[in-house]
Image: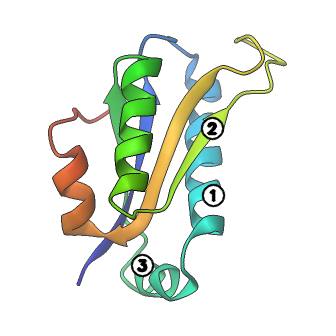
Amino acid sequence: MSYKQVILARQDLKLPKGKLAAQVAHASVEAVLKSDPEKVKAWRKEGMAKITLKVKDEQELVTYFQLAKEKGLTASLITDAGKTVVVPGTKTCVGIGPDNEAEIDQLTDKLPLL
């Protein structure tokens, strides 16, 4: 089995590159911290594949977050503190996995790369 992690990022926010990178990193780390340690170990051994994909808005972000949880995938929804460019409570990214690559692909394969 191959493992990977996917991070979904909202495009409607038009975040500056540095802010976007920070939000993606938050989603990645938070999802890893919630994940099964054995899956993390296997994922690390394989090189820790991470793919960042685009979602158009908050509704699509939350939909994928819910679908991931329904499929039994580890998922983390990042909500910004609002100290810089967005208002407090803005949902920015979702981290999914690390988990079975095929299961994640079934959920996210229609989304475009960031």
Type of amino acid at the residue the image marks with label 1: Val
Q: Nearer the viewer, residue 61 or 112?
A: 61
Front disc: 1 or 2 = 2
Q: Is residue 34 left or right of residue 12?
A: right
Q: CA distance from mark 1 to mark 2?
A: 11 Å
The secondary structure type at the circle numbered 3 is helix
Q: Which residue is mark 1?
A: 29
In percent of the image, x 35 and y 66: which residue is there? 4
- Mark toward the start of the polypeptide (1 vs 2): 1
Front disc: 2 or 3 = 2
Q: Position of residue 21 (x, y in %)?
A: 58, 35
Type of amino acid at the residue the image marks with label 2: Ile
The secondary structure type at the circle numbered 1 is helix
- Mark toward the start of the polypeptide (2 vs 3): 3
Q: Nearer the viewer, residue 83 or 62?
A: 62
Answer whether labels 2 and 3 touch (C-beta < 8 Å): no
Q: Which residue is mark 2?
A: 78
- Mark toward the start of the polypeptide (3 vs 1): 1
Q: Position of residue 14 (x, y in %)?
A: 49, 11
The secondary structure type at the circle numbered 2 is strand
Q: Is residue 94 left or right of residue 87?
A: left
Q: CA distance from mark 3 to mark 1?
A: 13 Å
In percent of the image, x 66 and y 67: which residue is there? 33
Work out which residue is located at the far right of the displayed protein and give it: 83
Q: Nearer the viewer, residue 60 or 6?
A: 60
Q: Which residue is mark 3?
A: 43
In percent of the image, x 51 and y 79: which residue is there? 40
